Amino acid sequence: MTTAPADARQPRLTELFEAGLDAPICLTWELTYACNLACAHCLSSSGRRDPRELTTAEAKAVIDELEAMQVFYVNIGGGEPTVRPDFWELLDYATAHHVGVKFSTNGVRITPDTARRIAANDYVDVQVSLDGATPEVNDALRGPGSYATALRALTHLAEAGMRGVKLSVVCTRHNIPQVDDFKALADRFGAQLRLTRLRPSGRGADVWDELRPTAGQQRELYAWLLDHGDSVLTGDSFFHLSAYGRSLPGLNLCGAGRVVCLIDPVGDVYACPFAIHDEFLAGNVRDAGGFTGVWRASPLFQRLRAPQTGGACRSCGFYDSCKGGCMAAKFFTGLPLDGPDPECVRGFGEELLARRATDGTDRPRPSVDHSRPVLVPLTRRPPAPPVSACDESPLSGFRP
Amino acid sequence: MPTDRPGPRADLDRAWVLHPQVSLRPEPFGALLYHFGTRRLTFLKDPRLVEIVRRLPEAPSARAACADCRIPDAELPRFGAALASLAESAMLVERAQSGRHDLKGSGLA
């Protein structure tokens, strides 16, 4: 919402934001790469903890900086942030220092006790991730048992009296048909539904082609989002759909390095949570100037705040609505950053995608990968009859 | 826009103050206001409006705060409407009321 005396000479808010702010409005902070799950589309390729992750003292120093910069809240994620032993300590430290916290979890550490602790803190919001309204659809993506874990967490939070929990869904080809079921599920727990866009980031790059919504689903989703307005959150992630006509609620611009950024578990600062790649690395909170120095002076962020040309999209009549879409989506699908979004609703991205190498060699790979080694199921040889009973057990035939 | 819509008017002759859970962050274009209770963010795009909001706690009335900022009479209705919009979203509260708010953890603001 904007408050200003009506005045035609005022620049539009998006123009102010494109030039960047003195501090982010909010930022994403991934506390650990460790995760109990191994979701197929994980945007941060999480799994194993990184030994260089920020210590408790270093994390508190970052919070001190955020307080001084008046960053009103952080979106904490991972990995699974709650598996950090100091998670609850950092949560309390942040809210005691005027930094509100919204954290994302798969629910693994949400017990009746922790749910009560969360409900007692007015400055904490929780986002429970679920990518299917049924166990079949969810667990295929997030792993066996993850649906049950999320629902157990939602139950504990509701029983603890926590209001305004977010049920957070990454929209895929398989779950967009369930969007009304998600809404019903959220309503059942007194939660608010949050739908976000699947990005080809992290391990998401490997499954993006098969999971991304069809063109027809994009249109349905757009209509659904317009119908539901402010009652459904989107993290402003569908602004590329605004080119269908009416703008969706939200900022409708790429905030990377302008109003948002990412601090990763080892303190690296990236332009946005979906851009964990050297190309978008602005610095590290351990650098001499700290996070503040990175935000205000990094050459990368300065460049992102400079006026953008629009490139190939400039002549498109919808450029003002979609602004060329998502930078990370373009980058990881190997499309030029000044051209159309791969999911451009006018189909210009689709044309470029079709021209790429079929073996994927022309696409950048994530620079950082903490995935656990793939567990190859051990194949057991079919049992052969033992040559003699003694080959199976030295005690065979022994009867005390 | 606040001027086109009926709604609670900020009485310019009363004393107002930022809600105790609201933080104001200066920016080159004006300021951001964030309400830690409602989680709402508001942008003040006019530096004069920011100055008025800053002066509210010391001013006997909103009208006096506007006068301190040398707002011409002709512009008072526009600023009054902007303040009304802030009051409507609970960013501003009447000063007499603010003491009665019993807000858990309001020390945050």
Image (tube, coloured by chain):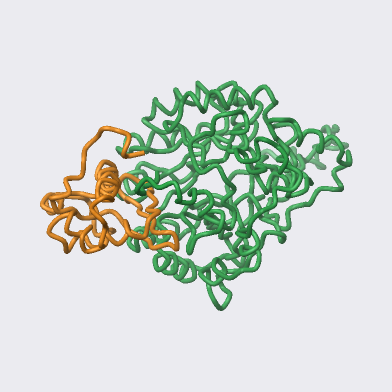
Chain colours: A green, B orange
Q: Percent position (x, y) of residue A209?
A: 75, 34
Residue A197 lies, with reference to residue A263, above or below; the image says above
Task: Please tell me which residue is depicted at 30% across the width and 37% down the height of the picture.
Answer: A161
Nearer the observer, B10 or B42: B10
- Tell me, yes or no, if residue A400 can be seen here: no
Point 20% across, 45% down: residue: B10
Given residues A184 and A353, the one toward you in this image is A353
Please give left or right for residue A46 compared with residue A120 in the image. Answer: right
Residue located 39% across and 46% down the image = A2
Q: Nearer the viewer, residue A344 or A306?
A: A306
In the rendering, at what x and y percent does residue A18 appear?
56, 54
Outermost residue on the bottom side: it is A288
Task: Say whether residue A277 is left or right of residue A382.
Answer: left
Q: Is residue A192 above or below residue A289?
A: above
Residue B55 image position (x, y, % from top left): 23, 62
Q: Is residue A279 left or right of residue A226?
A: right
Circle count: 0
